[in-house]
Image (tube, rainbow, N blue to C red):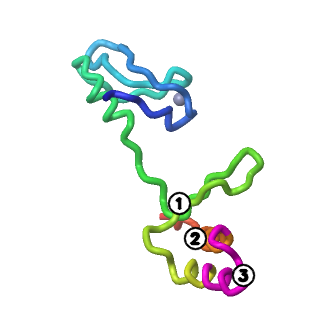
Amino acid sequence: MSELLPCPFCGGKAEFCKVGVNYPFKAGCANCEAFTKGSAFENNEYNAQCWNRRAAPPTGTRYRDEAGEVAAVVVPAEPTERMVDAGEYAQEHGCYVSGIWADMTAATPEPSNP
Ligand SMILES: [Zn+2]
């Protein structure tokens, strides 16, 4: 299946297209100028694989909603000691699972700058 993820830059709808001469077959954004490097062959499977390849966001990345509130946090596969402490503290103070989870994710360390 050659489905394309939305554009990683603007969130626009992606599509297969033909642009240029040497490597004309590409996947790209219908909204902005983002394209894959392309292929000499009309191979949508290959172009979809190129377009859909994304780097994983670093642990601690916060995604915010339109109001600026944290809507999602990239958490580590194993909680840090600080996250466990936050969860235990919430549990000791009568929080249910959602409250414990909220405190643990809030304690996720911010991504470190390389
Ligand atoms: Zn775009």
Which residue is located at x 23 percent, y 19 percent? Answer: 40
Specify the segment rendered in magenta: 87-98
Does the beta carbon at disc 3 come under 8 Å from ligand 1? no
Give percent across and percent down for residue 107: 62, 73
Which residue is located at x 62 percent, y 53 percent? Answer: 63
Residue bearing the label numbered 2: 108
Q: Is residue 111 left or right of residue 38?
A: right
For numbered disc 2, what is the local secondary structure? loop
Which residue is located at x 27 percent, y 28 percent? Answer: 45
Type of amino acid under label 2: Thr
- Compute the Cα span from label 1 to label 2: 8 Å
Q: Which mark is residue 94?
A: 3
Q: Is residue 90 left or right of residue 33?
A: right
- Is the C-beta separation of discs 1 and 2 under 8 Å? yes
Which quadrant of the rendered structure holds the N terminus? top left
Give percent across and percent down for residue 74: 53, 60
Q: Earlier in the sequence, mark 1 or mark 2?
A: 1
Which residue is located at x 74 percent, y 51 percent? Answer: 68
Residue 16 among those drawn in magenta: no
Type of amino acid under label 1: Val
* Viewer-side label of 1, 3: 3
* Viewer-side label of 2, 3: 3
Type of amino acid under label 3: Gly
For numbered disc 1, what is the local secondary structure? loop
Of all residues, the one furthest to the right in this rendering is 67
Q: Is residue 46 above or below residue 58?
A: above
